[in-house]
Image (spheres, rainbow, N blue to C red):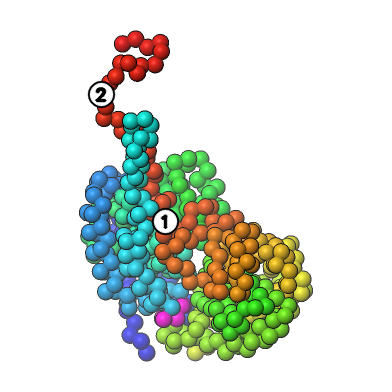
Amino acid sequence: MTQIFSIKHQGDFIAGRFVPVEKGDGEFKDISPADLNDQIMTVKFKYDHIDEACLAAKKAFPGWARLTLDERKTYLLRLKEIFDTHTEQMAQLISRDTGKPLWDSMTEAKNLGNKIDITLNNSLKLINETHIPNALPGVEGVVRHRARGVMAVLGPFNFPAHLPNGHIVPALISGNTIVFKPSEQTPAVGQFMAQLIEKAEFPPGVFNLVQGDGESGRRLSANENVDGVLFTGSYDVGLKIKQETMSHYWKILALEMGGKNATVVWDDADMDKAIYETLIGSYLSTGQRCSGTSRIILHDKIADEFTEKFYQAAKKLTIGHWSENTFMGSLINAGAVDKYIRFQEIANREGCESMMRGKALDLKHKGYYVTPSIHLVPKFDPNSVYQKSEIFGPNVAIYKSSNFDETLNIVNSTGYGLVMALFSKNKSLYEEALLRARVGLLNWNRTTNGASSRLPFGGMGKSGNDRPSADYAIQYCTVPVASLEDPTPFDKTKMLPGITL
């Protein structure tokens, strides 16, 4: 049995120290979804700590923003070393908190330090100071990017370290301060991130952590001292954040809100590659990825062959505890299992054929384990609840279509617009999809998930609000400030008519 790295609840991290919660507004138990006997910690939370953390971040902002870029880099590079030396502990906590297999969590843990590298070496160029000679006759123009202020980061459960870190690192390097609220599903990972950041000895108040429930997230988003809300999660919660901050005109919102992603496999595709990549897209992380494949649209000529091979491969996927090196782990909680089962019933009611039924599993470790599932869709229906809803579990719907126009209509039908994948040797189809698919990411002969941090990551429609993250995150963390700089002496001969000095 893998040796367990223990962690105890320390409270909230405010102004450079952990502040215990003696008498809070509520508490919840952090129990591993992979093993219900593994109680990781009990978390007490206090709403007043949100105000204290936001005020600490606001007080720390001027000093942090005044540091030079090189001075802020020193802190981030120190944090990278700390991240890199704690990847095994972080990966284990991610697995315990989420139920993901350890190999999957290790990839996430290693990405924490990589994000700092990519931001410093790649993303910073997007906010380089720019000089424009003769922006006006004889006057130089300069564009600089200024930090916004206090950024609230609301983390998801599926990538509880990597996705918040994707906001935190670019926000810090560009001069902002942070108040981070982890998902209540994954508080241990959030606390461990704060412990590692504490080791990097950032100035007090530059980074703060508050634990809490959904109401905590609402209060943080609505706090008067917050200048931006950086969120990853469901469309419904993202919409509530937007509604809560409608009158807060000064706040920027970067909302990444999921997807109902489609993979298209045409008749000339490399069959084995398409099957393998689409298995990864559909079932990696037990389907709990915003970029996961929810729908497969197959050309009629290859539909039967693809479907049978895909089905046979899906049946062989291994499922189990995070320590057992399986392909799939657990879902996040009992509600996710209920939703997963319920949507299969909805699919059946709406006339879809259950080729592979997903069911709850009773394994050695008692947790929220399910089998993957496949539904065959006899007819595209834009009003179908099943066909347009994000399930966030290991279910995939298979369609047939040999008309590429019709195929793109299906791709665009759900209201979401995160990722599309196309498997074909025909580049003209890819170019048509680039023109017409309403998505923020379009992959050619590559599955929908597994994005690069060196590229922007964001969607259209219900998938986001035009604030792509990853490489582009640093842009929404800053405000471009334009200046006209005129060093020439005053020339009375150029005065406008009607003015006398």
Q: Are marks 1 and 2 in contact (CB under 8 Å)?
A: no
Across and down, in percent, residue 127 comes to 36, 50
On screen, residue 87 versus residue 447, left or right, reads left
Q: Residue at x 53, y 43 (%)?
A: 246
Q: Which residues are magenta?
A: 99-103
Q: Amino acid at mark 2?
A: Pro
Across and down, in percent, residue 384 comes to 73, 65
Label 1 vs label 2, nearer the camera: 2
Q: Is residue 101 magenta?
A: yes
Task: Please name the residue that numbered disc 1 is placed on.
Answer: 473
Q: Is residue 302 above or below residue 195?
A: below
Label 1 to label 2: alpha-carbon separation: 41 Å
Choose the circle earlier in sequence order: 1 or 2: 1
Across and down, in percent, residue 430 comes to 60, 66
Q: Is residue 469 above or below residue 446?
A: above
Residue 269 in view (yes/no):
yes
Q: Main secondary structure of the magenta part?
A: loop
Which label was assigned to residue 489? 2
Q: Residue at x 23, y 54 (%)?
A: 70
